[in-house]
Image: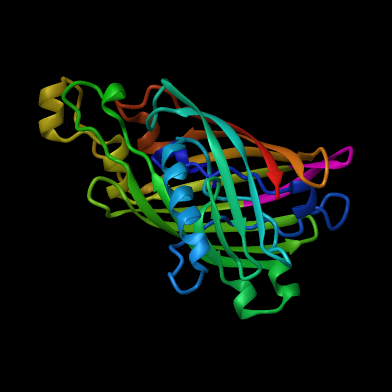
C-alpha cells in the first residue's frame, strides 16, 4: 500500500496494466487487484510450476524496497494461463528511515492462472480466491486472497554501531479490494510476521483511480499504514542496551499510524507482446516512526521500471 517499505515492509511494484485494469470508462479503474499472496499447495499447481515458483520467491527476496507499497495493481485473472519474462530495475531506501539507497537490476518473471494463482517477482506467490468462489463478473469487482512476501530489515552496513541489525522476514498478507465505483478502487491489506520476533503486524488502507494519458492510463494511489508496537520497535526502536552501546537515546514506539503515501503506476504497450511498466512511490513517515533517532529521512521514495515480454 501505501508502500510497504516506509516501515520495514517489502516492495511490491504495481506492474499490471493500468490501461486495462483502470479502464471501464474514461477514468475508471476496472480490476486493480491487491497483490497479496500465499504459498500455493503442491497439488494445486502442476509440477512444471514448482521451479518457477521457487525462482520467483528467490528473486523477490532480492528486490527489497523500503517504500514500495503492499497495495498492488493487477488485472483480473486471465481467461488462459499466461507467462511473462523480462528485466527490472529498482531503487529504494536501504533501511527503514534511511537516506542511503540501494539499486538492482534483476530478471523478472510472472505466471498468472485463471484460478487467481500467481507467481511473480513483482507480486510474490499467492492466490486471489474470488475466481474460485464466484463468477467472472464478481472477479472484476472483488479481489480477496493472501500472499507471502519478503520484508527486509536493516543490513549491517547501514546499522549504527551498537544497534542490533534487523534480518529479513517472510510475512503473510491477506487482502480485500472492491471496485466501489466505475472510477474508484478501495483497497486493504493486513500482514503479520514482521519484526525481530515475527510478531509485527500492519494494516494498510488505500484507494486508487486513473488518469488517462493518450491511449494509456496512469494509476494514482493514496494510502496509509498502521502498525503494532512490535513492528515499530523492530524497525525504529532503541532498547536500553542499544542506547548504552550506541550513545543514542532510548526510543519505544507505540502502536499507531506509521506512514501515508502516494504512488503513480503505469504501463505502455509497444505491441501485443512487449510492454514497459513502472512505479514511483513516496511514503511519508509519521508519528513515532518519523521521530525515531534512527530515522534520517521522513520521505521514503521507491522507483521501479520493468521491460516485459509475454510468451
Magenta residues, start to end: 207-218
Most extreme residue toward the front is 48
Q: Left of 88 or right of it: where is 277?
A: right
Instruction: Give percent across and percent down for residue 111.
Output: 60, 56
- Residue in the foreground of this view, choosing between 182 and 255: 182
Question: Is residue 213 rendered magenta in the image?
Answer: yes
Q: Left of 144 or right of it: where is 309?
A: right
The quadrant where residue 81 appears:
bottom right
Q: Residue, x 61% and y 67% (percent of image)?
A: 116
Examine the rendered structure and indicate whether residue 135 appears above or below residue 4: below
- Residue in the foreground of this view, choosing between 120 and 297: 120
- Residue in the foreground of this view, choosing between 8 and 135: 135
Q: Left of 37 or right of it: where is 27?
A: right
Q: Residue, x 63% and y 64% (percent of image)?
A: 113
User: What is the chief secondary structure element of the magenta stretch?
Assistant: strand
Q: Is residue 174 visible?
A: no
Instruction: Give percent across and percent down for residue 226.
Output: 43, 49
Q: How is the image coloured?
A: rainbow
Question: Is residue 126 rendered magenta in the image?
Answer: no
Instruction: Give percent across and percent down for residue 118.
Output: 56, 59
Amino acid at each position: 500500500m501505501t508502500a510497504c517499505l516506509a516501515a520495514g515492509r517489502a516492495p511490491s511494484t504495481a506492474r499490471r496494466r493500468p490501461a486495462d485494469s483502470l479502464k471501464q470508462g474514461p477514468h475508471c479503474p476496472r480490476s486493480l487487484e491487491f497483490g497479496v499472496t500465499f504459498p500455493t499447495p503442491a497439488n494445486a499447481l502442476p509440477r512444471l510450476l514448482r521451479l518457477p515458483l521457487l525462482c520467483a520467491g528467490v528473486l523477490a527476496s532480492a528486490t527489497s524496497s523500503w517504500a514500495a507499497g503492499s497495495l498492488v495493481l493487477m488485472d483480473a485473472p486471465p481467461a488462459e494461463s499466461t507467462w511473462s519474462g523480462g528485466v527490472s530495475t529498482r531503487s529504494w531506501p536501504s533501511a527503514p528511515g534511511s537516506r542511503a539507497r540501494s539499486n538492482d537490476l534483476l530478471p523478472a518473471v510472472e505466471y498468472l492462472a485463471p484460478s487467481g494463482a500467481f507467481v511473480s517477482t513483482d507480486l510474490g506467490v499467492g492466490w486471489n480466491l474470488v475466481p474460485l468462489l464466484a463468477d467472472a463478473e464478481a472477479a472484476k469487482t472483488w479481489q480477496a486472497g493472501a500472499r507471502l512476501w519478503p520484508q527486509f530489515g536493516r543490513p549491517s552496513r547501514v546499522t549504527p554501531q551498537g544497534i542490533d541489525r534487523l534480518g529479513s522476514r517472510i510475512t503473510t498478507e491477506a487482502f480485500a479490494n472492491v471496485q466501489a465505483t466505475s472510477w474508484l478502487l478501495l483497497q486493504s491489506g493486513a500482514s503479520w510476521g514482521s519484526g525481530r520476533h515475527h510478531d509485527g503486524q500492519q494494516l494498510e488502507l488505500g484507494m486508487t483511480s486513473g488518469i488517462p494519458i493518450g491511449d494509456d492510463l496512469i494509476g494514482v494511489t493514496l494510502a496509509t499504514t498502521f502498525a503494532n508496537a512490535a513492528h515499530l520497535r523492530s524497525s525504529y526502536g532503541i532498547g536500553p542496551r542499544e542506547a548504552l552501546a550506541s550513545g543514542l537515546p532510548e526510543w519505544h514506539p507505540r502502536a499507531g499510524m506509521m506512514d501515508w503515501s502516494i504512488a503513480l503506476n503505469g504501463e505502455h504497450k509497444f505491441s501485443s507482446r512487449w510492454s514497459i511498466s513502472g512505479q514511483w512511490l513516496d511514503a511519508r513517515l509519521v508519528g513515532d516512526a518519523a521521530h525515531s533517532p534512527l530515522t534520517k529521512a521522513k520521505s521514503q521514495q521507491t522507483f521501479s521500471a520493468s521491460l516485459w515480454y509475454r510468451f
